[in-house]
Image: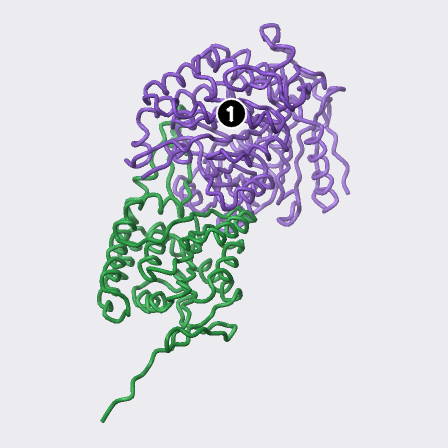
Amino acid sequence: MSRLAVPKTYKLFVGGAFVRSESGRYDRHGDRNVPRASRKDVRDAVAAARRAAGPWAARTAYNRGQILYRAAEALESRAADFAIERGEVEGAIDVLVHYAGWTDKLAAVLGGVNPVAAPFLSFSLPEPTGVVGVVAPDEPELLGLVAELAPALAAGNTVVAVLSESAPLGGLDLGEVLGVSDLPGGVVNLLSGRRAELAEALAAHPGVDAVVDAAADPSLAETVDRLAAESVTRVRHAAPTCSYEDAVADALSRLEAVTELKTAWHPVGA
Amino acid sequence: MTTPQTRTSIAWDYAPAPESPDHVRLRESYGLFVDGDFRDPLDGTRVPSVNPATEEPVAEVAFAGPADLRRAVEAACRAQPAWAALSGLERGKYLFRIARLIQERARELAIVESMDGGKPVRESRDLDVPLAAAHFFYYAGWADKLSYGVGGRQVAPLGVAAQIVPWNFPLLMAAWKLAPALACGNTSVLKPAETTPLTALLLAEILQEAELPPGVVGIVPGDGAAGAALVREPDIDKVAFTGSTGVGKDIHAALAGRGVPLTLELGGKSANIVFEDAALDQAVEGIVNGIFFNQGHVCCAGSRLLIQESVADTVIGKLWERMGRLRVGDPLDKNTDVGAINSREQLERIRSLVSAGEEEGAVRRTVACELPERGWWFAPTIFTEVAPAHRIAVEEIFGPVVSVLTFRTQAEAIEKANNSTYGLAAGIWTDKGAKAFEVAKALQAGVVWQNTYNHFDPTAAFGGYKESGFGREGGPAGLRPYLKVS
C-alpha cells in the first residue's frame, strides 16, 4: 500500500516563528507555494530584529560562537534535506564554523588600547552596528545567504534577510535549521518574495542600521544607496559569494561593515 | 516665556593678555592652492575672510568655481601614481616634515585660527595646532606599516580623495583628513569651510616648504555649492566629509550607485551624564568644558546634560555659578574662555533654537556679561526643565547652550542618552569604576568619556554611531577608509 507523503508548507521565519505573509500573497516555485512577503512583513521583521538586538549583543562572545557552531552542526545533520548540491551545503557549514570562531577574536583584531598622550586608559572596541539587512543573491541560494548572515551574527548583530528571489527554498529550509540552533527568536529573520520590493523597504527603514547588498544588481544598488542615505544607514555592496574560500578571504572586511568602533576614555590617577 | 536672568556684574581682577598678531605673516590675498602653487581662480571669485570678533576682513581668499575644482582634481589624478609609488618611508618623511613645520609655525597658526574663526587663542594654541601636528606625526609613522594597521591585509590606496572640512576646527580637521589619506598613498583635494579658509592656506604654504610634490594636495576654498560640486567630480575615488547631518545625507545620496567609499562625521546631541556619586566640582568643570569649549561649536559637545535628580539642584547651582565666571570676549586674549560665534548665520541659528526653547516652555538663564559692540557673540546659556521632545533637547544647537534633563535610575539615564538619532559622544561622571564601564558599554556613541570630556588624540579612533556618521578618524581604524584591502 502506498503512503501519502506529507509535504511541507513553506513559511517566512520572523521573530523565531514560522509565519505566512501578512499579505496572504504567495509565489509558485516548482510545485510549492512560497510566501511573497510584503513591506509590512519587512517592518514586522525589523521590529523583531530590534527587540532581539540588545540581548543578542549582550551575550558573551563565547556563547554567540557556540550558537553559531551549533547552527553548523544542525546544518550538517540536515544537509541531505536540502535540494541543493552537497558541495554548496558543505561550504555553508564551513562558513558557519569559520565565523563561529570570530566572535571572540574580533575585538583583538579591530580594537585595542590607544596609547594616548595623556593620563587615560583609552581603548577602542568593535560593537555590533545593530540590525543588519541582508539582500541575498539569486545564486548560490544557500551559500550566498550564509556568507552574509554569518559575519553579521558573529559580530553580534541581528539580521533581516531577503532571500534569493528565484530560488528561495534553500533559505527557507535554513530557517528550520536556525530554529533548532539555540539562536534566540528574532536574531535571524528570513523573508521570501520580490527582491526589489523588500530590499527597498529594508534600506528605507530607519530601524535598519546597515545593509549588506549581495544581489549584484546595479540599479537596485543605486536605489539602496539613495534610500539608506535618508537615515545614514551603512551599506556594503558585494558580489555573490560562490565558495567557502570567497566567504572567508575577506572575512575582516565583512565583519567591519557591520561593526562600530567605540572609543572609551577612563582616567588613570586623579 | 521667560526673560534672561541677569546676574550681578563681577568686577574682573585681571588684566587683559592679548596675543599680538604682529608675528603673523598673512598675504593680502590668497589664490587657490592647485598643483603645488597658489593660482588665480579660473571661474571662481575672491571674497574677504572675516574676523567674527570684529567683522573686519582678515585677508582676501579665492573661492573655487567648477573649472577650478576640475583643475584641482586633474592635478591630484596626475600626481597620484607617483605619490603611491613612493616607498612608505619616503611618504612618511614628507608627513613628518609637515608635522615639524606646523610645530615651528604653531604660534602664527594659532593666532590666525582665532582671528579667522573666533575661537579663544588659548584653545587654538593648546589644542587645535598641537593636535594637528600630532596627527601628521602619527600617520607619518603608519605610511610604511600600513598592513599592520588593517589586520595584516594587503593594501592599496584608493586614488584621489575629496575632503570637506567644517569651520569649527579648520586646521585640525584638515590634518585629520589629509594625514591618513596621504600616508595611505592617496592624493587629496581639500575644501576648507567657507568662513575659515585661512589656516588651510597657511598649511598650503607649509606643504610647499615641505616640498610635497605638486598636486598631491590641492586646497580649494569655497562655499557649500563648491563642496557639492567637488563630491560629484567623476574622477574622485573617495569622499570624506565632516559637517552637518543634512549635508552628509545629500552627499551619501549623490554618490548612490557609484561605489565611491564614503566617510561621514556628522552632527551630535551628546549626553553628558552626571551620577549622584560623582565628584561634583570636577563634574561641573567637565560640563563647562563639554559645552562651552569652542563656544559649543563642537560636533561632540555635551549639549544634553543628564543629571541624577538627587544632585540636580546642587549641580545646576554650581554650574550656574561657574558659568558666571566664564570670560566671554576677545578671542586673542589669552584669558578668554568663550570667543566669538563663527558667523552671523550661525548666530542666527543659535538664537532661533534658543527662542524655540523658550517658546516650548523650558527655563532659560543666560549669563549677563558685557559683550563687545562689534562681532557676533552669544553669552553662555543654560536651559532647565527641558522635556526630551523639546527642540533644544533633540536638535544640534552648535552654540554655548546646554539643555538640562534629569533622571532617577541608571537605566533611565541610558535610555534617555540613547534616545537620539545621533550617536557621536557621551560623558559619564561617577566615582564607581564598574558603573562607568557598564554605562559606557550601553551607550550608543562612538566616543565615551568617563570623568572627562572633549579629549582627543591621534591614536584614538573618533566617529559616530547612527546619524552621526560612519567611518573613523584617528588610530589604526583611521587608515581603513583610505585603503583598498584584499
Taking the image as drawn, is residue A166 in sight?
A: yes
Say few, some or many: other residues with alpha carbon within 10 Å of mark 1 (under 14 / 14 to 19 / 20 or more).
Answer: many
Q: Quadrant of the C terminus of chain B?
A: top left
Q: Is residue A211 above or below residue A24?
A: above
Q: Is residue B482 above or below residue B116?
A: below
Viewer-proximal residue, B394 or A119?
A: B394
Viewer-proximal residue, B406 or A201?
A: A201
The amino acid at mark 1 is: Ala
Q: Is residue B159 above or below residue B106?
A: below
Taking the image as drawn, is residue B409 in sight?
A: no
- Chain shown in green: A
Q: Colour of chain B?
A: purple
Q: Is residue B369 left or right of residue B242?
A: right
Q: Position of residue B390 (x, y in %)?
A: 66, 47
Q: Is residue B231 left or right of residue A50?
A: right
Q: Residue furthest bottom?
A: A1
Q: Position of residue B150 (x, y in %)?
A: 33, 35
Disc 1 target residue:
B174
Residue drawn where x is 45% and y is 50% of the image: A210
Viewer-proximal residue, B264 or B257?
A: B257
Residue drawn where x is 31% and y is 83% of the image: A6
- Say which chain tag 1 marks: B
In terms of secondary structure, where does tag 1 sit?
A: helix
Q: Quadrant of the N terminus of chain B?
A: top right
Q: Residue furthest top?
A: B22
Q: Position of residue A178 (x, y in %)?
A: 32, 65
Q: Is residue B58 left or right of residue A65?
A: right
